[in-house]
Image: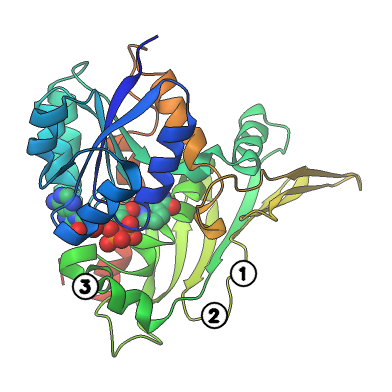
Amino acid sequence: MTSRRIGLIGCGDVSVVHVEAIHDIEGLELVGVADTDPQALARAVELTGVPGFASTQELIDGVHPEAVHVTTPHHEHIDPSLTALAAGVHVLQEKPIAHTLDEGQRLVDALESAPGAAKVGICFQNRYNLASQRLHDLLASGALGAVRGAWASVVWTRSADYYRAKPWRGTWEGSGGGLLINQAIHTLDLVQWLLGGVERTDGHVATRRFADVIEVEDTAELLLHHPGGVTTSFYATLTAPQHRPVEIELDCEKAYVSLRGGTEGGLTIRWADGRVDTVGERSVTSGGRSYWGVSHELLIRDFYERLEEPEPFWIGPREAMASMEILTEAYRLSGVGPGA
Ligand SMILES: NC(=O)c1ccc[n+]([C@@H]2O[C@H](COP(=O)([O-])OP(=O)(O)OC[C@H]3O[C@@H](n4cnc5c(N)ncnc54)[C@H](O)[C@@H]3O)[C@@H](O)[C@H]2O)c1
């Protein structure tokens, strides 16, 4: 069997997880890397042993990949992805879809105006966590009864050096936001996926600790309104002294369900009749950081396994717009961000 030829665009922190997954998944071969920063590119060429290029187009022309992984900063997602799509090359792109809703819409439109040409997947890998999938199945089956309300939190830590090391992370222009678009977006995505979308967002964002180094928010409190009158109370911050596990809790007619993220995480279902069921999470097998979740490789594997199917990949650009819409509304309500 010939291997699928894969290119990687953007050779920073998260690219390592993609390189490892491409290496570990049978039938995939990394054939080229691209970065606009010559030093990052040189490091990646040395690490991977494949040719390096200064742009997406040069990589495509030079090594003719079947797919590229786009692991660039948020404001550099859409152009590389559109360049690949225009060449008929499949795209697996990191979250968020883009740094603004309008930019994200360009990718949605490009894909929908040329259906069937190439596929696009967006890395919301936490949908592949065992606990997330089990909870989704339980909700879909009706076993939990009606959901009465939900709570979710992302209480993590960051340092000023995290932003100083990669300044795009702290700017509206580069990142399109802070905590919500970069870290908590995974949990926003999970909550909206589990509870049938978000019809309205109330809330506020603030910069509580890092105002001297970043423009964007490091803390948020939201109330998400789902169909049927269900709400999620959502709190997120990067000001904690240590990472706490991500929490999603659902108060349902027949059980109270607690999902915990990270390698120690899982699902606990406390049934109304007193039974307690638990589902443990997988442990991290790659060099990825535990708070990134444990499922990058699963998503990447699934993307390639489904490549020949006629349907679009299930976590594509339109799906990725849902979390973008929530956080964009939170920024608008707080009077910050591109629309302020
Ligand atoms: N799914 C997850 O859990 C997860 C985890 C971490 C990061 N991410 C996402 O991955 C992306 C990258 O984050 P990071 O922390 O690795 O960033 P980073 O700054 O460490 O790396 C980005 C790299 O892209 C390069 N680059 C910029 N513009 C480019 C262009 N047009 N073409 C080619 N290369 C370009 C930069 O020079 C840099 O080397 C972000 O979207 C981030 O949100 C996702």
Q: Quadrant of residue 21?
A: top left
Q: Give the x, y percent position of residue 322.
A: 34, 45
The residue labelled by disc 3 is: 171
Alpha carbon of mark 1 to alpha carbon of mark 3: how far? Answer: 25 Å
Q: Quadrant of the C terminus?
A: bottom left
| Residue 223 visible from this viewpoint | yes
Closest to the observer, 73 or 105: 73
Considering every residue shown, the one lying at the far right of the view is 274
Q: Is mark 1 within 8 Å of ligand 1?
A: no
Q: As displayed, is residue 101 above or below residue 316?
A: below
Report if the CB atoms under discs 2 and 1 are less than 8 Å apart: yes
Count of numbered labels shown in the rendering? 3
Three-letter amino acid code at disc 3?
Answer: Thr
Q: Circle 1 sits in a helix, a strand or a loop, which is it?
A: loop
Q: Which mark is residue 17?
A: none
The residue labelled by disc 2 is: 240
309 sits left or right of 164 in the view: right
Q: Circle 3 sits in a helix, a strand or a loop, which is it?
A: loop
The residue labelled by disc 1 is: 244
Report if the CB atoms under discs 3 and 2 are less than 8 Å apart: no
Alpha carbon of mark 2 to alpha carbon of mark 1: how far? Answer: 8 Å
